[in-house]
Image (cartoon, helix red, strand yellow):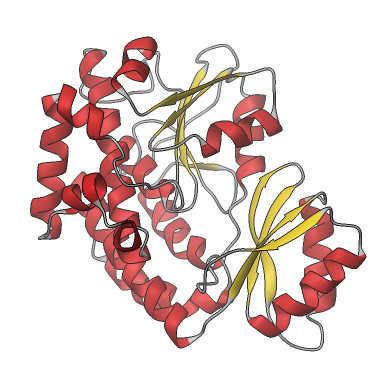
């Protein structure tokens, strides 16, 4: 088993990979036009998936791109294309613990699969297949057992978790899905539990509770059927120990073995994404630069709320690549 230790001052950069919601029509098109390796990455993705995910990314339609079954492999392909451009421009084809960049990798929810590809634990092709199936199973579970998600502003994770537990004692499901940053928590569950919890959160003084425009209760027990089926796919996939430290969503601790990675990917579907705690682990290790690799800048925005003093970089254009390398 590989052992990783964060040594303060030894490294200072972390690579972050966004999850579902960051996708948009036209993402990474400029990079594909500027760098052949980015174009080749999308061509590989098209071949693996058996349909032109590249066309969906570049031209839409948006409704089809945002469908869970498509959004997840699209985001992975886009983020890996950016990562490969960075590696090429830095003169390295692989990440390693000795390299200046990065000292760790992490991905938010589905982005954790991209982080595993970056860390060498999962091949790009297998990563695409996994998230495509993950998206399909999540969509199927959501159709069979529709749920709700809501963003909660102004209360911390412990308060929200306590209110969820109290509000669902008489039935229903609601739990913390994402602890994104101080004052921003997402909850998830079935309609009965969520309606009771939303009322309780508002009564407890939450600044805002905003239901999200989704019917899939991600990171909640409603995803257990998807987790059970996905486990069989994960068990059949080649997974190796990471070459650089990767911080797990559900435990906010380092993943150092293939066994731990398999367990994390299954637990992640029904468990909470502990993003704030994950970033605190990196901060405690002395990481001072957080680089978001993928469409959008959601994670950079969250990092600003977690620790304003650190450097935050987003890379998804040729200009961003040139500025970083």
Q: Position of residue 56 (x, y in %)?
A: 22, 53
Report the side of 119 relative to 8 (left or right).
left
Residue 136 placement (x, y as % from top left): 32, 71
Q: Quick one: which residue is furthest to the right in this view?
A: 204
| 286 sits left or right of 96 in the view | right
Q: Quadrant of the C terminus?
A: top left
Above or below 195: residue 29: above
x 23%, y 24%: residue: 85
Observer able to see residue 68:
yes
Residue 322 at x, y = what percent? 32, 12
Q: Quadrant of the N terminus?
A: top left
Residue drawn 17% across the image and 22% down it = 34
Residue 120 visible in the displayed image: no
Using the image, determine if residue 146 lies above or below residue 164. Answer: below
Residue shown at 37% from the left, 19% from the top: 320
Relative to residue 217, is residue 186 depicted above or below? above
């Amino acid at each position: 088993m590989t052992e990783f230790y964060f040594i303060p001052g030894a490294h200072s950069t972390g690579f972050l990979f966004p999850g579902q919601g960051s996708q948009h029509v036209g993402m990474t098109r400029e990079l594909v036009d500027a760098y052949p390796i980015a174009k080749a990455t999308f061509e590989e993705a098209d071949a693996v998936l058996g349909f032109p995910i590249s066309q969906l990314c570049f031209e839409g339609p948006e409704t089809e791109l945002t469908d869970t079954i498509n959004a997840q492999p699209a985001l992975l392909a886009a983020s890996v294309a950016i990562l490969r451009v960075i590696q090429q421009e830095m003169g390295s084809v692989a990440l390693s613990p000795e390299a200046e960049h990065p000292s760790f990798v992490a991905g938010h929810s589905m982005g954790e699969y991209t982080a595993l590809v970056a860390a060498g634990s999962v091949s790009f092709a297998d990563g695409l297949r996994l998230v495509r199936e993950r998206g399909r199973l999540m969509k199927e579970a959501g159709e069979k057992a529709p749920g709700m998600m809501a963003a909660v502003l102004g209360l911390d994770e412990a308060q929200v978790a306590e209110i969820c537990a109290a509000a669902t004692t008489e039935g229903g499901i609601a739990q913390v899905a994402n602890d994104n940053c101080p004052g921003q928590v997402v909850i998830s569950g079935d309609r009965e539990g969520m309606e009771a919890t939303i009322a309780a959160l508002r009564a407890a003084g939450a600044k805002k509770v905003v239901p999200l425009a989704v019917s899939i209760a991600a990171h909640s027990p409603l995803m257990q059927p998807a987790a059970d089926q996905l486990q069989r796919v994960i068990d059949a996939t080649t997974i190796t120990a990471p070459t650089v430290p990767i911080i797990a969503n559900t435990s906010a601790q380092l993943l150092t073995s293939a066994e731990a990675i398999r367990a994390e990917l299954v637990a992640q579907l029904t468990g909470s994404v502990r993003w704030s705690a994950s970033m605190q682990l990196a901060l405690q290790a002395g990481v001072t630069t957080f680089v978001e690799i993928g469409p959008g800048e959601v994670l950079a925005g969250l990092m600003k709320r977690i620790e304003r003093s650190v450097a935050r970089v987003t890379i998804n254009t040729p200009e961003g690549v040139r500025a970083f390398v």
